Image (cartoon, helix red, strand yellow):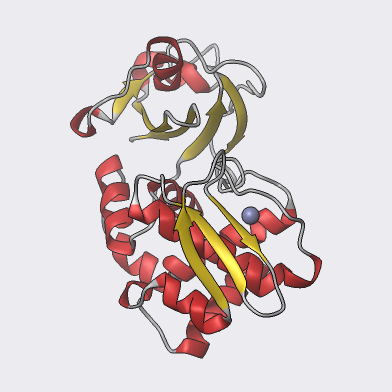
Amino acid sequence: MSRGKLEAQRLLNEIGITDPTAIEINKIAFGLGATVIEKPLKNSDGRIVFSKSRTIITINSGIEFTGKKRFTTAHEIGHYCMHRDHFQAHNDTDATLQYFKKGHQETEANEFASELLMPEDLFKQEIQGKKFDPELLRNLADRFQTSITSVAYKYFELGGHPICLFYSFDNKVRYWKRPENYPHYIIDRTKLSPPEDSVAAEFFDKEKIYRKTDSKQPIWKSTWFELKNWENDQDFKFYEYCIITPKYNTVLSIVWEEL
Ligand SMILES: [Zn+2]
């Protein structure tokens, strides 16, 4: 198990919590010795400043969604618990709060936050027997009071339906991941713009953002995947759902096949 996940489980055990929504995240931080304050931050969602007396976690008051504030706070608590002796000072932004970021302190802090807010057992219980769609992700974000992006990554890890993730920023694909043994081959577009018939491209080209009810959009297999010459696009049912953050000009595309 990853260190971040292990540390979060240890903390939950220690404070005797099975459902993290039962306690305010700021109180968990306070109990550990860190004070959380909110104020406007430029180009940053959160940051942490260590001190011998009291560590200060600052969360950008401009963050629109409570779930995202909670996830950012949990990420900073992760830094506090695991990295305080050799911390690499940084601003946490949309990029560092994504799981793709390989810097190991960021990965650990995200794995920590994910487990602190969505303990594995509880998450599995909540998705059991439920069909995968954007509505499920939104419901899970409500249920666990966390960001929808963090739910998408958690579902990628633990969910019953295989999904692929593509993270684009400034009209360029930056990272992608697919489940192990996924039967379709992804066309690598890293550093290139998203495919022109993708939902991500609709946002970058035309600023199109679908309403909740239309957020599951049909796409071709060939949009993101290699179409073998014996295959026909008509024979596949692929969908793309985009989590868009206009403020940072980022899109997380969730792509899946229905059989
Ligand atoms: Zn960080």
Residue 181 locus on image (x, y percent): 58, 43
Which residue occupies the foreground of this view, 171 or 59?
Answer: 59
Residue 123 locus on image (x, y percent): 38, 65
Q: Tell me which residue sits at (60%, 49%) in the image.
A: 92
Q: Is residue 47 above or below residue 243?
A: below
Q: Tell me which residue sits at (30%, 25%) in the image.
A: 217
Q: Quadrant of the N terminus?
A: bottom right
Left or right of 179, for residue 244 = left
Residue 1 seen in this snapshot: no
Q: Residue furthest right?
A: 86
Q: Quadrant of ligand 1?
A: bottom right
Residue 214 seen in this snapshot: yes
Residue 139 locus on image (x, y percent): 25, 53
Which residue occupies the foreground of this view, 56 or 248?
Answer: 56
Q: Tell me which residue sits at (54%, 18%) in the image.
A: 171
Left or right of 72, for residue 96 = right
* Quadrant of res 172: top right
Q: Quadrant of the C terminus?
A: top left
Q: Tell me which residue sits at (42%, 71%) in the image.
A: 25
Q: Is residue 69 above or below residue 183?
A: below
Q: Is residue 151 above or below residue 86?
A: above
* Quadrant of res 255: top left
Q: Is residue 171 above or below residue 4?
A: above
Left or right of 61, for residue 142 = left
Which residue occupies the foreground of this view, 82 or 73?
Answer: 73
Residue 127 locus on image (x, y percent): 32, 60
Q: How many marks?
A: 0
